[in-house]
Image (cartoon, helix red, strand yellow):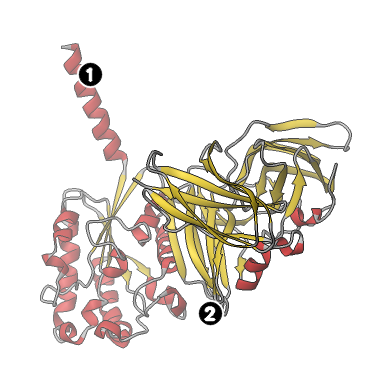
Amino acid sequence: MKKWSMIVLLFCFVITAWADEIRISCVGNSITQYKVAYPGLDPNAYPTQLGMLMGEGYVVQNFGVSGTTLLKNGDLSYWDQQAFTDVLNSEPDIVTIMLGTNDSKPQNWIIKDEFKSDYIALIDTFRSLPSNPEIIICLPPPATSSKYAISGDTIANEMIPIIQEVIQEKNTRMIDFHTFFTGKEHLFYDGIHPTVEGCWQFALLLYSNLKEEDAPDVQTLKDINLALNKPVSSTQSAENLNNIVDGDIHTVWYGESGESVTIDLGAAESVDMFQLIYRALVHFGYTIETSDDNTSWNTVVDASDNPETEHAAIESIEPIETRYVRINMTSLDPDIDFIKLAEIKVLQTAPAHAPILTYESGQVTSRLVRLNLYIISSLKGGYIRYNYDTLIDGIFENGIGYRLMDDYESSQAVRSDADKFIFAKYYKDHFEAVSDTIRFSYSVITDVETEAGLIPERSILHQNYPNPFNPSTQICFELRVPGNVKLTIYNCLGEKIKTPVNQYLDAGDYAYQFQAGDLPSGTYYCTLESNGRQIHRRMLLIK
């Protein structure tokens, strides 16, 4: 008897918790559905973004269907779709309706006299549901293209006045996307459908209308790097030391294993995060100390045995006040006696921090260079996105939307005649942290491969091909000058797997076929050492 009582109690608890959630059903066409066919979930669609913004206590569902009309007798009526049945069964507390764009097509608008009565019928159908939902009418955005035979003039001059009559007669709330997006053509990639940033703007406007009175607005933050261009000193090598505080990840500094770097922030500042950014496979340990007087030091981070430092080391701490920061670094790889850093950031205390952007460059041709881009979340548990473009007319139009992830990796080509600009954002708890925009150009990246003259370019390690691979891949490298060469394969833990080359070689081109038939799937690294320089490439084995 006691067992059944517990089951009934648990069932009641689940039902109560479910009932406490506010369910929002978004009805619409392809602008709502976006690029993943119903009933799939598109992380870039505005209902997905809205659900992220509304947070706990809300369930937002996407019932958009591409090409549909509000008209019952339209060429693809929403009334006839499975999504319409699913909305009726979703027990919504709120229904948002954004239909009409496809109704403006000539073959549909010819029966425009039915549009008002069909709209009223749709509202009445939703209002008759047992959940008694609130109905919110969304005026469709402007259409600046005649693509798909959609008429922007019909939407603006004929359809919207009819919808406004319906809103007044049925006493419904309205969200005016048409006025909001007028003059913002850059947020629609084809004049009809929103870009990723356009979807985000849809979600923001919906959120501002739907959020509770005490819910916060979305705030955009920019990280303040307290170490930027501040005095920096080292216990050993001072050459090019300013490269780690110049705000430019294209410039690098080679430090010796066991070296300490001290940064003077100029005044006592509140700090809650340290970032060490680099562009190569590096396994090193470090400690971070703080001081008010550059004499008495307090250890705030001890990662002296930290092999998981692949592209960046990120240390989040409770906020502290400090003027001086000292970082002590030691290589954990017995074959590597130096540390290669692109930037050290000491971040001012803030509710959220932007993602880190770093990279490796791959094979260079006369017109293309391969950019292996890594975007690493500074904080866990939020959403991350990035945008990239060649900055045509100053507008970023490509990239991924917000999605739940810690890191993002992509491989792209940078052309010799077009620079690429990339920035990333991180969202959590109604804060949007935006990174700096980084310029990637063919000349900059190829110059960086020679470390801007720091170490002469005497060798080139190309990206293995194919990659991913199974079970073998070819590793090619070039020697510009003769010398002792060591080619080593490591696993993701930094453990040495094989050293296929360890000898003196003449200048020239070389190729090695790596066989991995006896190795498990995973990430591996190839390191080429020659003439005092190390180059690393990431390899992915998938079986």
Dot in front, 1 or 2: 2
Residue tagged by mark 2? 392
Left-right relation of 47 to 422: left
Question: Which residue is at the front of the view, 17 or 409?
Answer: 409
Q: Provide the secondary structure element on which disc 1 rests.
A: helix
Query: Label 1, label 2: how many angstroms apart (C-alpha)?
Result: 63 Å
Q: What residue type is labelled 2?
A: Ile
Question: Which residue is at the front of the view, 295 or 17?
Answer: 295
Position of the C terminus by quadrant: top left
Which label's residue is closer to the chain start, 1 or 2? 1
Q: Residue at x 67, y 61 (%)?
A: 250
Circle 1 residues within 10 Å: few <14, some 14–19, many ≥20? few
Q: Provide the secondary structure element on which disc 2 rests.
A: loop
Question: Which residue is at the front of the view, 211 or 373?
Answer: 373
Examine the rendering and report whether any part of residue 161 can be seen.
Answer: yes
- The percent position of residue 268, horizontal first and vertical second, equals 81, 43
- The percent position of residue 370, horizontal first and vertical second, equals 53, 65
Examine the rendering and report whether any part of residue 214 can be seen.
Answer: no
Residue tagged by mark 1? 6
Query: Which numbered circle lies on residue 157?
Result: none
Q: Which amino acid does label 1 sit on?
A: Met
Question: Which residue is at the front of the view, 183 or 471?
Answer: 471
- The percent position of residue 240, horizontal first and vertical second, equals 80, 56
Left-right relation of 17 to 348: left
In this picture, is 148 found above or below 489?
below
- The percent position of residue 185, horizontal first and vertical second, equals 44, 79
Q: Residue furthest top?
A: 1
Left-right relation of 317 to 71: right
Position of the N terminus by quadrant: top left
Q: In which quarter of the image is residue 49?
A: bottom left
In this picture, is 245 found above or below 118?
above
